[in-house]
Image (cartoon, rainbow, N blue to C red):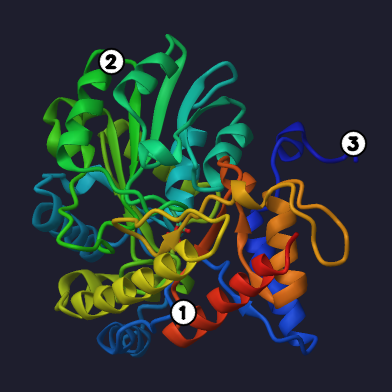
């Protein structure tokens, strides 16, 4: 349709949201569906956070706030960066946005021009390339294989950078693979980045708090202070605090970038919800011990799913260090015939087959730039996961 802009025609609707919606529709139509597509914790927002929101409403915190965050929330974020990441940010170096998605969207829109390149390791979070495309720039996708632990190597990073590279978008722990980089791995990547001063780094730390087996989370600006001045350290409340619906993301970074992000926000959404900001202030300032219990539950689920998938012929599932996703390789299923006669040509067909035959909704790897594979979100009960994996095993067993 010619009425629509060139920018809108460059992007697709989010495929993970599409799978979640399709699963919900089938469920509403009466089918027995287990949805493993959604990227959100099944846990509820902690009660002390809800109470803070209710209190904020009663106290009349129902008006516009400062465009990019209240002073109270920015102060809580400042303390969080200091406590968790040993990063010192001034209040004027902090921005609060309508989810981490908007943080990244605003940052890219504020900095990218046609011809600019953005390095994105794959498998990637679905929105990165489309945000870059919407901004008119060029995503440079760097495939990272299962045998590399789905991680970017310094050599591959070096090879992907050109004089036109403006950003590296870096995500650890990763959505969709759960891969998390150690301090040494970050150091090795940082050595490359130090040699390319034109490159800014968007460190998407959204899954910082969801790590397993004593994995120690670190972030790029922390392990290499020389990168501090050109790193946007992005985080948010959605995953750690089970607050996906509240829509609060935030970042720390260089003042001119933070100001530019606020400028876009001032002409688009204005401030994030005042009540949600009060709730996240409480979440960040409050007792963090509930995270330990939740991570223990996630870890039990991860172990269950990895074990059951690896007992399925044709699937190969690494054990991730973080987030709540697994990313099994399904090369062994491609080319197999379904009981009804059709052939599984690619991972999209594999995902469709699981949904049609057994009512299990997963997201195909092509959506994340890493095929053939699929993503399972294990943010659901062990009973659901056991049933879903049993169904996947049955579906795979029926292939010829
Ligand atoms: N970054 C990653 C890697 C994510 O997986 C998500 C959510 O799925 C986000 C950022 C954005 O989260 P939100 O906009 O809910 O803060």
Q: Quadrant of the N terminus?
A: top right
Q: Vertical placement of 149 versus 175: above or below?
A: above
Identify the residue under disc 3: 2
Locate residue 353 relative to residue 233 in the image: left or right.
right
Name the residue nearer the viewer: 249 or 298: 298
Disc number at residue 197? 2
Image quadrant where one finds the C terminus: bottom right
Q: Residues within 10 Å of mark 3 (few under 14, many from 20)?
A: few
**Above or below: residue 149 compared with residue 341:** above
| 341 horizontally vs 27: left or right | right
Question: Which residue is pictured at 38% across the width and 86% down the height?
Answer: 57
The answer to whether marks 2 and 3 mark residues whose Cβ atoms lie closer than 8 Å is no
What is the x, y in percent for residue 200? 34, 27
Under circle 1, the secondary element is loop
Q: Residue furthest top?
A: 163
Do the residues bearing badges 1 and 2 touch, measured as CB atoms within 8 Å?
A: no
Q: In this rendering, would 92 be left or right of 178?
A: left
Q: State the residue at coordinates (27%, 34%).
A: 231
Q: CA distance from mark 1 to mark 2?
A: 43 Å
In the rendered image, residue 176, in percent from the top left (x then y), is placed at: 47, 53
Q: Is residue 325 visible?
A: yes
Task: Check disc 3 and report its element: helix, strand or loop.
Answer: loop
Instruction: Look at the numbered disc 2 and say if its residue's Cβ is closer than 8 Å to ligand 1.
Output: no
Residue annotated with mark 1 = 380
State the image coordinates of residue 209 (x, y, percent, origin top left). 25, 62
């Amino acid at each position: 349709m010619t009425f629509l802009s060139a920018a809108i025609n460059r992007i697709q609707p989010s495929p993970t949201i599409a799978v979640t919606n399709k699963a919900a529709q089938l469920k509403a139509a009466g089918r027995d569906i287990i949805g493993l597509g959604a990227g959100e914790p099944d846990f509820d927002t902690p009660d002390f956070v809800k109470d803070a929101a209710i209190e904020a409403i009663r106290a009349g915190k129902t008006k516009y706030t400062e465009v990019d965050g209240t002073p109270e929330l920015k102060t809580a974020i400042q303390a969080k960066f200091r406590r968790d990441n040993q990063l010192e940010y001034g209040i004027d170096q902090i921005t609060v946005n309508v989810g981490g998605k908007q943080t990244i969207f605003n940052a890219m829109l504020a900095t990218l021009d046609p011809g600019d390149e953005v390095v994105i390791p794959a498998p990637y979070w679905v929105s990165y390339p489309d945000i870059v495309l919407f901004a008119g720039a060029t995503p440079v996708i760097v495939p990272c294989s299962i045998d590399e632990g789905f991680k970017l190597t310094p050599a591959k990073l070096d090879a992907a950078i050109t004089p036109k590279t403006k950003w590296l978008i870096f995500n650890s722990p990763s959505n969709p693979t759960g891969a998390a980089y150690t301090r040494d791995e970050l150091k090795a990547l940082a050595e490359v980045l130090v040699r390319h001063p034109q490159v800014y780094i968007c460190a998407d730390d959204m899954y910082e708090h969801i790590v397993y087996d004593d994995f120690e989370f670190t972030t790029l600006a922390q392990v290499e202070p020389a990168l501090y001045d050109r790193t946007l350290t992005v985080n948010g409340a959605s995953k750690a605090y089970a607050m996906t619906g509240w829509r609060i993301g935030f970042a720390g970074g260089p003042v001119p970038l933070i100001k530019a992000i606020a400028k876009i926000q001032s002409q688009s959404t204005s401030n994030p919800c005042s009540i949600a900001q009060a709730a996240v202030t409480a979440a960040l300032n409050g007792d963090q011990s509930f995270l330990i219990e939740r991570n223990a539950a996630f870890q039990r689920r991860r172990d269950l799913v990895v074990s059951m998938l690896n007992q399925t012929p044709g699937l190969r599932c690494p054990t991730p260090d973080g987030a709540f996703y697994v990313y099994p390789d399904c090369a062994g299923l491609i080319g197999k015939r379904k009981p009804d006669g059709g052939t599984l040509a690619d991972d999209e067909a594999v995902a469709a087959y699981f949904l049609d035959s057994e009512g299990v909704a997963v997201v195909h790897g092509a959506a994340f730039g890493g095929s053939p594979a699929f993503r399972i979100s294990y943010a659901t009960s062990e009973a659901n996961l056991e049933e879903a994996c049993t169904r996947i095993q049955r579906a795979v067993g029926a292939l010829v």
